[in-house]
Image (tube, rainbow, N blue to C red):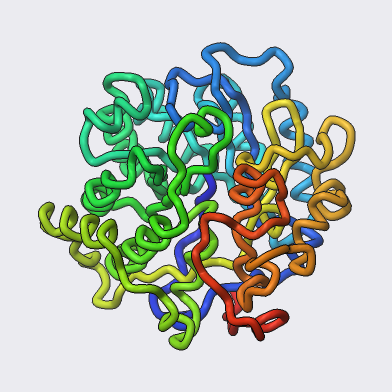
Amino acid sequence: MRPADARPAARAGRDAGGVRRLRFDAGARPFLVLLELTRSCELACAHCRADAIRTRDPDELAGDEVRAVFEDLASLGSPRPIVVLTGGDPFRRSDLTGLVAHGARLGLTIAVSPAGTPRATTGRFAALREAGAGAVSLSIDAGNPRAHDAFRRVIGSFDWTVAAVRAARAAGLRVQVNTTASAETVLELPGVAHLVASLGASLWSVFFLVPVGRGARLGALGAPETEEVLAFLDDVSDAMPVKTTEAPQFRRFATTAELRGVHPPRGPLYDELHRRLAALGGIERRAETRAPRRRPPLAVGDARGVVFVSHVGDVSPSGFLPLVAGNVRETPLTQIYAQAPLLAALRDPDRLRGRCGRCELREICGGSRAQAWARTGDPFAEDPSCSYEPPVEARGGRAAVAPA
């Protein structure tokens, strides 16, 4: 999960024509911490970046070590980071509710990203809410059981996940639905969009496949296909909140009107996605608002406001960019985040190469460093999944952004 703004989404139209910036220095403290409690999971998903296993690793962070990370993060004071407890499946840990309660008592905003299995029950979600969690994210990769279960490689996972979304909402939790966009799943996006809207999820987060872990055996979308999918998501975001993971170029669609004019003509994939959505009846805007529910994207990224802690304490820019900057068993996370040379370098737009290095959006987008590393071996290379060609004179230019 990469979500969860575990806080309410921005009001529609508030930041029209731009993206949101953090109100603090993202080089000094993280905005979002993804903490992998375990790699144990009952699913066998085709794209799993963690290559999850059935049994728990005896070396995974113990409860006291997780609590120490929480206390370190809380020492930053306000604004404290959002912490997403992820996996594997966090419900595989019997101390999950206690950990959530500890983090919440410290003033941290806690979200949880469980797997869609029979463990995701109404009772467990109610316990998370009572402990202080504000949001959960659950993954749906198709609008029907056949395709979803084939991707997750466990029959019944679609029905369990849909039931889990309903149970989490009934418990008073905000729900983010995560969906993987790959060559194998891209035509399922309209069905998922329709389902997400019908389930009343707070946010749809589309993860663009990074070929790491098991995902290396799948088909990542090329730059032209990615552009058409982003255009489709931009259209859908008129009706419900949408965000992307490892496709930061989506921010280009939310910037100035002048930049919106540079998009190439829509192609056959874009047309097919809309045809399939129309066949399902489209998506109606939320009844509680007369205005579009556009959610201005936030100008953060891997190592730039976001950091990942593995189940054994390794700190990386993200779970999709498994370069290790340190370990929380040896050094406090706050110190690693602020001082590790790898993370500091990834925050420096002057280190970017190719099109990303000369792009006028390099400070609010910067390309996906995970996509660059997975496809070229260089985390500072231009993002091969982006088709945008910046103007020659763009180097050093800035796009206007609004504060978060």
The image quadrant of residue 52 is: top right
**Residue 82 in view (yes/no):** yes
Place of residue 340 in the rendered image (x, y in percent of width and height, measured from the top left): 86, 49
Q: Is residue 25 left or right of residue 390?
A: right
Q: Is residue 6 above or below residue 293?
A: above
How many circles with numbers are drawn on the protein?
0
* 154 lies left or right of 309: left
Q: Which of the two residues, 66 or 371, is positioned nearer the viewer here?
A: 371
Answer with the quarter of the image where residue 377 lies: top right
Q: Quadrant of the C terminus?
A: bottom right
| Residue at the image point whose x is 72% and y is 22% from the top | 62
Q: Position of residue 244 (x, y in %)?
A: 47, 56
Residues 30 and 255: in front is: 255
Residue in the image at 46% along x and 57% along y: 223
Image location (x, y in percent) of residue 353: 72, 63
- On the image, the x and y values in percent for residue 366 come to 64, 65
Residue 136 in sight in this render: no
Please state if 51 lies on the left or on the right of 44 as rendered: right
Query: Residue at coordinates 62% horizontally, 70% vertically from top-left?
Result: 364
**Figure check: 146 above or below 300:** above
Q: Nearer the viewer, residue 141 or 294?
A: 141
Q: Quadrant of residue 100?
A: top right
**Left or right: 159 as drawn, with respect to 318:** left
